[in-house]
Image (spheres, rainbow, N blue to C red):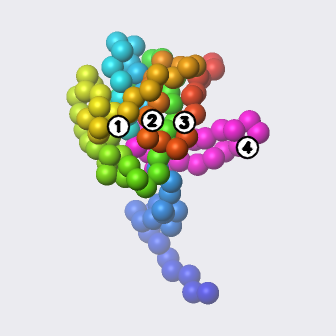
């Protein structure tokens, strides 16, 4: 096996492709936000824990900081074109789920909605 040196600017490519999730949040003002994240990783099986990285200036980060709630939506390849729409930069009051033509479903345990077309959803209520 032959190894190559990789500069820090390309190191993340060694971990690609990564699964992409769509995180849905709701602001304290009631604005729904949906954004895709590919910097994700499982960190525990029991209890099931997932980590994802968000830029502090993004709506997702701000909403989670304010409300301590979010939903992890696991998409499949059938909605890839719609997933990209959720990643576009929209004003805070624009609902990316609606913009992408996805189905918003009320969550039973948290305020942010689930995305109906996703194969799985994980309601998260932060503690602490």
Q: CA distance from mark 4 to mark 1?
A: 29 Å
Q: Position of residue 45 (x, y in %)?
A: 73, 43
Q: Earlier in the sequence, mark 3 or mark 4?
A: 4
Q: Earlier in the sequence, mark 3 or mark 2?
A: 2
Q: CA distance from mark 2 to mark 1?
A: 7 Å
Q: CA distance from mark 4 to mark 2?
A: 25 Å
At x 57% / y 86%, what residue is drawn?
2
Left or right relative to 127: residue 121: left
Q: Earlier in the sequence, mark 4 or mark 2?
A: 4
Label 2, residues with CA under 10 Å away: few <14, some 14-19, many ≥20:
some
User: Is 47 inside the magenta-drawn segment?
Assistant: yes
Do callouts 1 and 3 mark residues in contact (Cβ within 8 Å)? no
Do callouts 3 and 2 mark residues in contact (Cβ within 8 Å)? no
Q: Earlier in the sequence, mark 1 or mark 3?
A: 1
Q: Position of residue 51 (x, y in %)?
A: 57, 41
Q: CA distance from mark 3 to mark 2?
A: 9 Å
Q: Which residue is mark 3?
A: 121
The local secondary structure at tag 4 comes to loop
Q: Nearer the viewer, mark 1 or mark 3?
A: 1
Q: CA distance from mark 3 to mark 4?
A: 16 Å
Q: Nearer the viewer, mark 3 or mark 2?
A: 2
* Residue 64 visible at all: no
Q: Which residue is mark 4?
A: 45
Q: Which residue reaches farthest right?
A: 46
Please give the label number shown on residue 93.
Answer: none
Q: Which residue is mark 1?
A: 102
Label 1, residues with CA under 10 Å away: few <14, some 14-19, many ≥20:
some
Q: Nearer the viewer, mark 4 or mark 1?
A: 1
Q: Which residue reaches farthest top?
A: 29
């Amino acid at each position: 096996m032959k190894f190559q040196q990789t500069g820090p600017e390309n190191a993340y490519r060694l971990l690609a492709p990564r699964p992409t999730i769509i995180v849905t949040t709701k602001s304290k003002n009631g604005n729904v936000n949906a954004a895709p994240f590919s910097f994700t990783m499982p960190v525990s099986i029991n209890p099931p824990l997932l980590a994802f990285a968000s830029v502090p200036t993004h709506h997702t980060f701000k909403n989670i900081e304010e409300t301590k709630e979010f939903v992890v939506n696991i998409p499949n390849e059938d909605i890839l074109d719609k997933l990209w729409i959720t990643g576009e930069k929209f004003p805070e009051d624009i609902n990316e789920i609606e913009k992408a033509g996805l189905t918003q479903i009320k969550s039973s345990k948290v305020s942010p909605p689930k995305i109906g077309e996703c194969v799985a959803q994980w309601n998260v209520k932060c503690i602490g």
